[in-house]
Image (tube, helix red, strand yellow):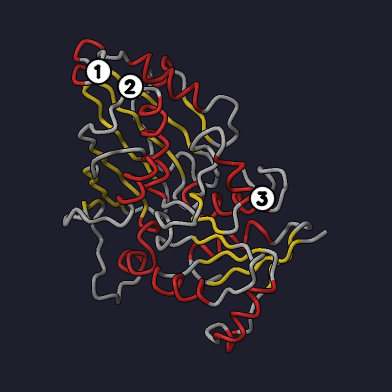
Amino acid sequence: MTARIFIDGEAGTTGLQIRARLDSRADVEVASLPDDKRKDPVARAEMLNGCDLAILCLPDAAAREVVVLIDNPDARVIDASTAHRTADGWTYGFPELDAEQAGRIAEAKRVANPGCYALASVAMLRPLISAGLLPAGHAVTLNAVSGYSGGGRKMIESYEDENAADYTEAPFRVYGLGLEHKHVPEIEVHGGLEKRPLFMPSVGRFHQGMIVQLPLALWSLPGKPEPKDIHGALAAHYQDRRFVTVADLADTAAMAGLEPEALNGTDELRLHVFANQAHEHAVVAALLDNLGKGAAGQAVHNMNLMLGLDEAVGLV
């Protein structure tokens, strides 16, 4: 049986990436509205209620408006926006969150696809808090660098369109200086934190690729865990997971650097634990393609689970 999928917002960055992953598949059919009907509420409602699964690739406000159009109790939706990531009645779309999350996603009618920064942050925080190595009330800081595609259409234009009002040739810049980045609430909730983390993102002059870092002063944590304890908790949590891997401690120690574009074109998230035992310091780093595991790849992963398919179909 072929599942009918509707991507509302298929012309945007994430929508195009999802469509590219589905076009060659025989087990799904992508249904589209004609250009002149894409904003027609009647036509959209008919498609949303009649397809097997809808994937929303829309701005937050538009995603909230579209969800209201769904009145079919059997309709299933993945929302790639920020709108519903901490909302009641929505399942967080990170299958590796814990041992039961993939099953929850498979049974859910409403799934919120994680934000790219948030997915990487939650992937580091949740296992350490669950293992008792990092207190939920700890003062957590997160630093990150992303390719400019992670900032959406406006940021993409600022790097690619020389006629854009905010065009820049800057090779690197820190942003989110008001400390109100929209991914922070989901990091706090799904990471298992009791206090809002301090998150400082930055962007480079490259299209895609991302690193998020979690610095840890090991001497400040209960029991003063060693780097091998941090690594062990992460490795145990993600054992036998297809799309989240934990690099070997020795291999990581031998690295001279970490490139944000290293996993581009894949749907993988890789964790590294960099450490200095003498100073009792460690930094957990999450490496991913912000358009892959951080967006479209994760949406397809969740879609596969919700349709009862092999989770890895169409992913790399």
**Residue beneath disc 2:** 133
Q: Nearer the viewer, residue 141 or 222?
A: 222
71 lies above or below 262: below
Q: Residue furthest top?
A: 278
Rendered location of residue 72, percent (x, y): 64, 71
Q: Mark 3: which secondary structure?
A: helix
Q: Which residue is mark 1?
A: 222
Residue found 56% across the figure and 54% down from its top: 299
Viewer-nearest of discs 2 and 3: 2
Query: At 69% across and 62% down in the image, what residue appears?
Result: 23
Please name the residue that numbered disc 3 is placed on: 304
On the image, which quarter does residue 25 sit in? bottom right
Residue 14 appears at what percent x and percent y?
50, 62
**Of residues 193 and 291, the one drawn nearer to the viewer in this rendering:** 193
Residue 145 drawn at (x, y percent): 31, 46
Instruction: State the SS at label 2.
Output: loop
Identity of the residue drawn at 49% across and 54% down? 113
| Residue, far left | 178
Q: Quadrant of residue 226?
A: top left
The answer for how far apart the CA atoms under marks 1 and 3 are is 40 Å
Mark 2–mark 3 Cα distance, whole angstroms, equals 33 Å
Determine which quarter of the picture holds residue 130: top left
- Looking at the picture, does residue 173 appear above or below residue 215? below
Q: Which circle's residue, 2 or 3, is located before the other in the chain?
A: 2
The amino acid at mark 3 is: Asn
Other-residue count near label 3 (Cα within 10 Å), few / some / many at <14 / 14–19 / ≥20: some
Q: Earlier in the sequence, mark 1 or mark 2?
A: 2
Q: Earlier in the sequence, mark 1 or mark 3?
A: 1
Q: Are marks 1 and 2 in contact (CB under 8 Å)?
A: yes
Q: Seen in the image, is 236 located left or right of residue 301?
A: left
Q: Kindly indicate whether the residue at mark 3 contacts the one at mark 2 (C-beta within 8 angstroms).
A: no
- Left or right: residue 50 compared with residue 101: right
